[in-house]
Amino acid sequence: MTADGYFGRFGGFYVPEVLVFALKELQAGYRRFSQDSDFKDDLHNLLCTYAGRPTPLYFAKRLTDVVGGASIYLKREDLAHTGSHKINNALGQALLAKRMGKSRVIAETGAGQHGVATATACALLGLDCEVYMGETDVERQKLNCYRMNLLGAKVNVVRSGSRTLKDSINEAMRDYASTSDHTHYLIGSVVGPHPYPTMVRDFQSVIGAEAKEQTLAQTGRLPDALVACVGGGSNSIGLFHPFAEDKEVQMFGAEAAGEGIETGRHSASVVAGREGVLHGSRTLILQDDDGQISETASVAAGLDYPAVGPEHAFLSGIGRAKYSAVTDREAVSAFHQLSEAEGIIPALESAHAMHLATIVARDLGSEKALVVCLSGRGDKDVDQIARLEGML
């Protein structure tokens, strides 16, 4: 990555003038505090004593036996406080905001997990919190909306556009542009203008750093492959980054194919997107022939976004990571499979990774091992699945 936030030709800082000062201030603050020993110690203590790190690396023996092929290990981010990997970045950025003298934090959320994590971090650190969430996502993630309210956050329902994650980011950026003197915008994924893709990756790299150490301790070697779901891509880049120089470790990202790539009703930006600029960053974007952002679809609200983090676009372009699209039907099947085989109910986002992991495991063969990032737990999705399957 270059100093101005580029990963090859992807990334950068494409923002209106009204946001330049705020983002330059954030860049300077992050450079300063990310190297500050007191900041790093405080964040480490919060991650360990409050968020529950390190999360376990679990050998899924029954699932491995059912699937056949490589041994499947689950990096259990679902066991982190608030139920997903999102707490890693939320604590890091909220602590940074407090150090920078900000009194208010805003965030966007799709599945609600980032919203809950942000509300949690703000409650802990005494910061005012508002979360922008699309009306479509509010309807399918009612439990997380209530959790945010319980934690003292205000949920702003976004009714513009597709009423999903893209539109929530739009509204949060408008808010940030007019309130940045006292507000920090806590972006939840590796998207947006520099320094967000780098900053969020750094806060999430605790996932891969732990997984590397744990795999070596349990198996005596590095895993042969890594698998994670990719919407914007924070859990996946957090797993991938510490292994970036370990060329023998393959990396696989699972995007949301929705109703099928051929239908146009999907959210697979790497598989089916084209280069463009969205939310301040050059990356791969789902767009029509006129360059207008395409409507997206996924059973998983957290993957329902028309672009991908620029570092993922770069990794795909150089062939370091491979990205595949998983349909709603395949993800729901994997949701049931992990639940029944291991007694672990995954988030629908994580279920996309679980489906791809079964394919990778068979391809690798029985002498190999792979690590899957189980990015979140599925409590939030049980009601949605029950309705889809006619149980409610």
Image: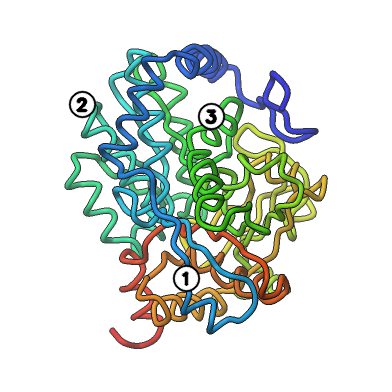
Quarter that holds the C terminus: bottom left
Q: Nearer the viewer, mark 3 or mark 2?
A: 3
Residue 319 versus residue 197 in the image, above or below? below
Q: Nearer the viewer, mark 1 or mark 2?
A: 1
Tag 3 or tag 1, which sits nearer the N-term? Answer: 1
Q: Residue at x 69, y 32 (%)?
A: 11
Q: Which residue is mark 1?
A: 60
Frontmost residue, 258 versus 313: 313
Amino acid residing under circle 2:
Gly
Amino acid residing under circle 1:
Ala
Tag 2 or tag 3, which sits nearer the N-term? Answer: 2
Q: Which residue is mark 2?
A: 126
Q: CA distance from mark 3 to mark 2?
A: 22 Å
**Few, some or many C-alpha atoms within 10 Å of disc 3 (few <14, some 14-19, many ≥20)?**
many
Q: Which residue is mark 3?
A: 199
Q: Residue at x 66, y 27 (%)?
A: 14
